Image (spheres, rainbow, N blue to C red):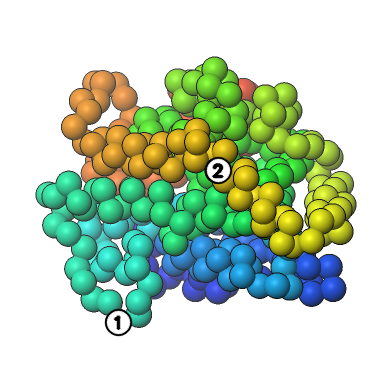
């Protein structure tokens, strides 16, 4: 697996620009050759940029998009596996804290805290997970291709989600772990019955399916997506004053917390932290040390081929049969 030093710097993965004239800021993910996989440092930078935009009087609308044919496939899995298997030596600043001189070691691998700190940080806004939940202006997510894992978290929290035809939504964790940190919010935004189907089958949902269950605001052809995003962003930026938008978002945040959004994130994190206590089936594909020692791409493809072609996570696998 790739070592930590071979990964690009966060500033190269997460780009930021703003237009004070329109009060529209844009975060662009720029790692298309790796399906815009997010390193932990990139997640921290994303969180910092969202937090910065929240206080910037020149920003009323934040657009999150990506270069390339996909929004993203989630976290940088090789990096996460390196951490979980102790192949790279990290300190806690890589998980939640971003103090450059913080050299506190990660807890020992045999402790509950080791796994918990690695998975429960998905409930922390500072780590780029719930950042859009705390963003009190208008957020718009532009989805093309894959919207998996970490990127699917952003779709649950964004105010407006626009998708291209052919986009796929889901999380590989439903097939490889069984849990993911933001399940409560997905239940709320998708509806519990459709989300239960996604969890139990592990299959990704199409943009149309997500539109039909009210998760996506609009679905357009791929080459019309950027224009549609601009249309929504300009309309939101020209609507009520920023202070009014802040008050509107406060209302929606109260509504989400009344439904238990943050409590649900914590509960899901606790379930994930106990994953090693769950006995695997003899024929199950487990993300364990044996899998880590094999070539990850081949291992994932082999598991994907066990499912019907139209339910596979890989675009290539879906089109091969």
- Identify the image quadrant of residue 244: bottom right
The mark lying in front, picked from 2 and 1, is 2
Q: Dot 2 lies on which element?
A: helix
Q: Where does residue 246 sit, x and y in percent of width and height?
A: 67, 57
Is the C terminus in the top left, top right, bottom left or bottom right quadrant?
Answer: top right
How packed mark 1 is, by other alpha carbons closer than 10 Å (few <14, some 14-19, many 20 or more), is few
Tag 1 or tag 2, which sits nearer the N-term?
A: 1
The residue identified by callout 1 is 101
Image point (35%, 77%), residue name: 99
Relative to 273, residue 72 above or below: below
Image point (21%, 63%), residue name: 106
Q: Where does residue 80 sit, x and y in percent of width and height?
A: 36, 54
Is the N terminus in the top left, top right, bottom left or bottom right quadrant?
Answer: bottom left
- Identify the image quadrant of residue 78: bottom left
- Identify the image quadrant of residue 264: top left
Question: 125 or 106: which is nearer to us?
Answer: 125
The residue identified by callout 2 is 254
262 sits left or right of 100 in the view: right
99 sits left or right of 321 in the view: left
Question: 306 or 231: which is nearer to us?
Answer: 231
Question: 308 or 135: which is nearer to us?
Answer: 135
């Amino acid at each position: 697996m790739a070592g930590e030093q071979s990964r690009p710097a966060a500033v190269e993965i997460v780009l930021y620009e703003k237009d004070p004239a329109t009060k529209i800021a844009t975060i662009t993910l720029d790692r298309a050759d790796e399906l815009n996989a997010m390193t932990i440092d990139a997640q921290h930078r994303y969180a910092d940029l969202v937090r910065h935009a929240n206080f910037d009087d020149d920003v009323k609308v934040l657009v999150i998009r990506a270069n390339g044919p996909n929004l993203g496939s989630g976290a940088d899995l090789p990096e996460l596996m390196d951490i979980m298997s102790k192949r790279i030596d990290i300190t806690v600043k890589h998980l939640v804290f971003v103090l450059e001189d913080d050299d506190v070691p990660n807890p020992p691998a045999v402790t509950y805290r080791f796994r918990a700190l690695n998975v429960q940080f998905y409930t922390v806004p500072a780590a780029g997970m719930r950042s859009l939940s705390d963003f009190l202006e208008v957020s718009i997510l532009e989805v093309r291709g894959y919207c998996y894992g970490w990127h699917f978290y952003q779709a649950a929290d964004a105010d407006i989600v626009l998708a291209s035809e052919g986009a796929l939504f889901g999380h590989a964790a439903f097939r490889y772990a069984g849990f993911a940190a933001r399940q409560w919010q997905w239940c709320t935004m998708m509806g519990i019955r459709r989300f239960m189907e996604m969890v139990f089958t592990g299959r990704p949902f199409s943009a149309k399916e997500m539109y039909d269950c009210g998760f996506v605001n609009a679905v357009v052809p791929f080459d019309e997506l950027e224009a549609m995003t601009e249309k929504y962003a300009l309309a939101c930026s020209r609507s009520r004053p920023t202070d009014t938008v802040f008050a509107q978002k406060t209302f929606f945040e109260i509504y989400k917390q009344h439904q238990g959004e943050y409590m649900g994130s914590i509960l899901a994190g606790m379930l994930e932290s106990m994953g090693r206590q769950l006995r695997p089936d003899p024929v199950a594909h487990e993300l364990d040390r044996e899998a880590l020692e094999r070539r990850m791409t081949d291992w994932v493809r082999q598991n994907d081929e066990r499912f019907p072609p139209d339910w596979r996570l890989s675009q290539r696998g879906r089109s091969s049969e």
